[in-house]
Amino acid sequence: MSTGTPQEEKHHGEDVCSVVDSLEQIGSQWRLIVLNDLQDGEKRFNELKRSTGASSRTLSRVLDDLQETGFVTRRLEEDAPVATYYNLTEKGASLCPVFDEIEAWADEWL
């Protein structure tokens, strides 16, 4: 049984949709792990592979997805040795406080 006005119910529904949409972009296990790992700054592919424990194929796919959605940038260093670096964009960095809050919540409740 609803106690809110139709306007309030519509607004609540929009809030839920925003949360669901956000989680669809960042919500996979590997996306969250990579985004969280990049909070410390720019990292090479192999550094991310070691620190996350992801396979090369999984990490490559996740990084491509995160680039397409605007959370991560890719920089190719062509000097010897050739290296690929990944970093959070402004959009990706804006998630850092969210990760801090989730970590605080997990410390208290999990």
Image: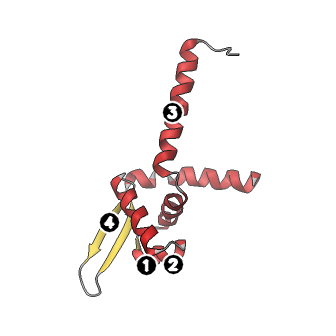
Residue 17 badge:
3
Pointer 2: what residue? 50
Pointer 4: what residue? 74
Residue 93's spot in the image, x, y percent? 44, 55
Alpha carbons under labels 4 and 3: distance apart: 30 Å
Three-letter residue code for mark 4: Arg
Sequence-first tag of 3 and 1: 3
When the figure is inspected, residue 27 is found, relative to residue 83, above or below; the finding is above
Q: Using residue 93 as the reference point, say whether residue 98 is left or right of it.
A: right
- Point 49% across, 59% down: residue: 31
Alpha carbons under labels 3 and 1: distance apart: 36 Å
Residue 40's spot in the image, x, y percent? 49, 67
The image quadrant where one finds the N terminus is top right
Residue 98's spot in the image, x, y percent? 55, 49
Query: Within 10 angstroms of label 2, few (less than 14), some, or many (20 or more) residues?
Result: few
- Point 40% across, 75% down: residue: 45
Q: Helix or strand or loop: what does disc 3 sit on?
A: helix
Three-letter residue code for mark 2: Arg
In-front residue for pair 53/92:
53
Alpha carbons under labels 1 and 4: distance apart: 14 Å
Pointer 1: what residue? 46
- Point 47% across, 65% down: residue: 38
The image quadrant where one finds the C terminus is bottom right
Sequence-first tag of 2 and 3: 3
- Residue found at the very far top of the displayed protein: 5
Q: Helix or strand or loop: what does disc 1 sit on?
A: helix
Alpha carbons under labels 1 and 2: distance apart: 6 Å
